[in-house]
Image (cartoon, rainbow, N blue to C red):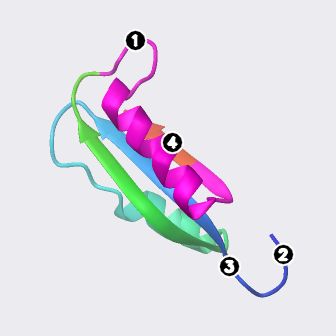
Amino acid sequence: MSGNTPETAVVAKRTDEPPVDTAEIEDLVRAAGYDVGVVLTQTREADSALQFGEGKVTELVRAVVEICGDAHVVVGM
C-alpha cells in the first residue's frame, strides 16, 4: 500500500444458500487498510471450474478492471 490513500479492494463471496453475509470479510479488508470498492455475491452451488458461475466471473472481471482494484478478495463457501 502506498502513502496515506487507502487502496481499493473488490470482494466477492459465494454461498450455497442465502443469506450471503459479507460483513466480516468487509471488516477484515478495511482492517487491512483497504477501501471496499465493490462487493459481489452469488447464491448457488459451486461451479467446479470457477467456484462462481460464468456470468458472475465476467461481472467480477469487469468490476476489477473498472475500479483497478488493488486487492481482490474471493470467498467461496
Mark-to-mark CA distance, 1 and 2:
37 Å
- First reached walking from the N terminus: tag 4 or tag 1: 1
Which tag is nearer the camera, tag 2 or tag 4?
4
Identify the secondary structure beneath mark 1: loop
Residue 58 in picture, x, y percent from top left: 42, 36
Q: Would residue 76 be visible to someone looking at this image?
A: no
Q: How many marks?
A: 4
- N-terminal of the two: label 1 or label 2? 2
Q: Residues within 10 Å of mark 2 (few under 14, many from 20)?
A: few
- Above or below — where is 33 with respect to 71? below
Give the residue at the far left of this rendering: 18
Residue carrying label 2: 2
Is residue 30 in sight in this rendering? yes
Residue 67, position as x, y percentages in the image? 56, 63
Residue annotated with mark 1: 48
Observer-side mark, 3 or 4, equals 4
Which residue position is annotated with label 3? Answer: 6
Q: Which amino acid, mark 4?
A: Val
> What segment carries the magenta color?
46-72
Local secondary structure at mark 3: loop
Is the C-beta separation of discs 4 and 1 under 8 Å?
no
- In the rendered structure, which disc, 2 or 4, sits on the residue that comes first in sequence? 2
Q: Quadrant of the N terminus?
A: bottom right
How far apart marks 3 and 4 lie (CA) works out to 21 Å
Separation (CA) of disc 2 from disc 3: 8 Å
Which amino acid lies under the numbered mark 2 shown in the image of this protein? Answer: Ser
Quarter of the image where one finds residue 39: bottom left
Q: Is residue 19 left or right of residue 42?
A: left
74 or 67: nearer the viewer = 67
For label 4, the residue is 61
Task: For marks 2 and 4, give the CA distance.
Answer: 23 Å
Q: Is residue 66 magenta?
A: yes
